[in-house]
Image: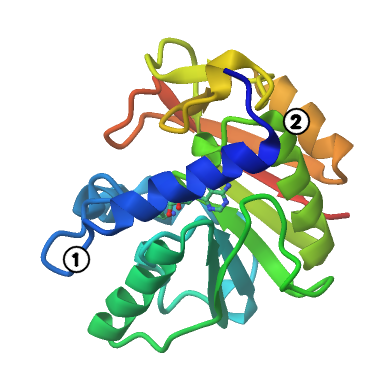
Amino acid sequence: MSLTENQFLQRQGQFWDDISTKWSLANKNPVVGWYDSHNNFSYYQTHLFRGIPNLKSKTVLEVGCGPARNMILFRDWFAQFDGVDIAEGCIEKARVNLAAEGVPIPNLWVMDGRSLPMIGDASYDIVMMVISHQHITSRAVRMNLYREYVRVLKPGGYFVFQTGYGSGHPRSVDYFADTHNTEADFVDKDVRVENLDHLKADLETCGFEWLDAVLTDTCHDEHPQWAWVRVVKP
Ligand SMILES: C[S@@+](CC[C@H](N)C(=O)[O-])C[C@H]1O[C@@H](n2cnc3c(N)ncnc32)[C@H](O)[C@@H]1O
């Protein structure tokens, strides 16, 4: 079944909202998957923000922030760390998690899954995504998000993210699929990046300058590898 983009995003939001109802301070694994394993997976610390100078002075926006795991993990790294998520339930759990950890509540917004109208132009130094870019199985939606990131980033700002790489993920869809393709209509799937040049071309089309991507092993994922990508707004 092919879907309109609105239908796809509505289903995606519902899917993550449903999972968020299972998340609690006593069980932080729903939504994230393996909460403690991700926190202990060292590439988050070594690869995600690699090479970005003066992190302490930077403002960060995480897209797909879930229950604020990264705001807590990186609580001392940045000047400001805000978040947006497609699921209202995830944003509610983010507030609960931050409060329990004694982290001041930053700006948190629910978004439509493809745009950031609540954020002004040139607002952030860094936009980041981890274990969320790969869940956006529509290329058209991803491209729209990339254009929004260019808009909300300051000149010289970075978009850094992790995404699954390689073939063989049993629930993955082709890189070029969008919501009009039948295989993309089920939200509990991942995009399969098999050629970094495809990603590079799309990010450049949307206005970014490509820096690099580093491939590593994964944290509890069905993708063979993870790509840690860095691009910059000229
Ligand atoms: C596996 S969780 C990861 C949460 C968090 N990034 C972390 O590392 O702990 C994926 C998150 O992405 C969000 N998400 C999925 N598709 C999205 C979209 N199109 N726009 C914004 N958020 C989205 C989900 O609601 C969910 O909170």
Q: Quadrant of the C terminus?
A: bottom right
- The residue wearing badge 2 is 200
Q: Residue at x 49, y 50 (%)?
A: 13
Foreground of the two, 190 or 110: 110
Q: Secondary structure at mark 2?
A: helix
Q: 112 and 41: which one is in front?
A: 112
**Residue 197 vertical position relative to residue 103 in the rendered view, above or below:** above
- Quarter of the image for residue 193 reads top right
Q: Is residue 233 visible?
A: yes
Classify residue 54 as left or right of residue 34.
right
Examine the rendered structure and indicate whether residue 55 appears above or below residue 36: below
**SS type, badge 1:** loop
Point out residue 92 in the picture as x, y percentages from the top left corner: 38, 73
Estimate the x, y position of residue 125 in percent, counting from the top left. Answer: 71, 69
Q: Residue at x 32, y 30 (%)?
A: 221
| Mark 1 to mark 2 CA distance (whole Å) | 38 Å
From this viewpoint, is residue 70 visible?
Answer: no
Looking at the picture, which amino acid does disc 2 mark?
A: Lys
Residue at 77% across / 45% down in the picture? 144
In-front residue for pair 120/91: 91
Residue holding disc 1: 24
Residue 111 drawn above or below residue 122:
above
Q: Which mark is residue 229?
A: none
Q: Quadrant of residue 170?
A: top left
Question: Which of pointers 1 and 2 indicates the residue nearer the eye?
Answer: 1
Q: Amino acid at mark 1?
A: Ser
